[in-house]
Amino acid sequence: MSKTRERIRESNLRYKQSLGQNFIYDEGLLAALAAEAGVSPEEDVLEIGPGCGSLTKHLCGAAHHVLAIELDERLIPLLEAFMAEKSNFTLIRGDVMALDLKQVTEGLRKPFAVAANIPYYITTPLIQRLLTAGLPLSRLALMVQKEVAEKILSGPGEDGWGPLAIRCQYLCEPRLAMDVPAECFTPPPKVDSAFIVMPVRKEPAVKPRNEETFFRVVSAAFALRRKTMLNNLCATFRADRAKALSWLEAAGLDEKIRGEKLTMEQLCALADAMEADREADR
């Protein structure tokens, strides 16, 4: 039995299903995950959900400093005791979905990395929050459901292609680092997981004239997946058919194309056509 598992057992701690607690105790796997995260000795790390500190220990060994946010107050004394000898570790008790992340990370070296074993129930909202909070990030290294990883890595026309994939690929260059079967966790979840690494791009993958319009178009494309983009534009933007057709024509798109088939470049061209039309009307 690993020392970390012993600590959990001795504390009589019961895993909270409501918090999505699934811990890894395999030291070899933990070392491999920390290595895949690609953290350097000059870099700081924001770790979300350190749990019992298993991965945290390895991150501290690789990084300049690790700032961890833990929601479960029962784990705080365990973490503080386990990480007491690490001078490059800081622990904050709080909800990552409620904290002011800019304020919390103000003292970290910029840019900093994020590492997280994300509870399944907040996977998409947390990724969205991290990518839209205006944080100076170098990369995200995330343990997620395998299904979510497949979505993030998917392309146009594939089942997973949608707003999450586009948001991630617009700002980052996601790659699959490792598949992690359910039996690697305690307690084992009902599905397999995957560790993905997403280096942040220096510039977005496309450069829309108006980013807000671009992401509104992205949302419209997948509002009704089996409808044509023409129908989705009319419904989302309350545009008449002639106006929506003019946008598609200006972007060089067929009126019968479905939103789920559009590439990021085509979505950007459509958003730019709409923005140009709006500017002309002003």
Image (tube, rainbow, N blue to C red):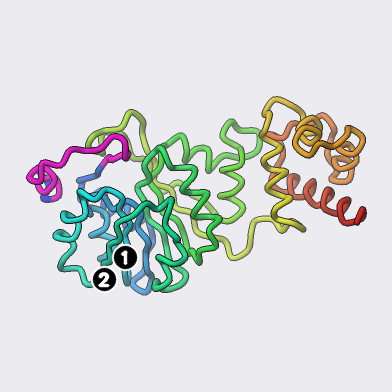
> Does residue 272 show up magenta in the picture?
no
Disc 2 on helix, strand or loop?
loop
Task: Please name the residue that numbered disc 1 is placed on.
Answer: 66
The quarter of the rendered structure image containing the C terminus is bottom right
* Residue at (30% x, 32% y) in the render: 189
* Residue at (20% x, 46% y) in the render: 25
* Magenta stretch in the rendered image: 4-22
Task: Please name the residue that numbered disc 2 is placed on.
Answer: 88
Type of residue at label 1?
Answer: Val
Q: Is residue 57 left or right of residue 171?
A: left
Q: Is residue 87 left or right of residue 123?
A: left
Residue 37 pos. (x, y %): 38, 57
* Residue at (23% x, 60% y) in the render: 57
**Which one is nearer the viewer's eye here, 133 or 176?**
133
Q: Are marks 2 and 1 in contact (CB under 8 Å)?
A: yes
**Which one is nearer the viewer's eye here, 180 or 259?**
259
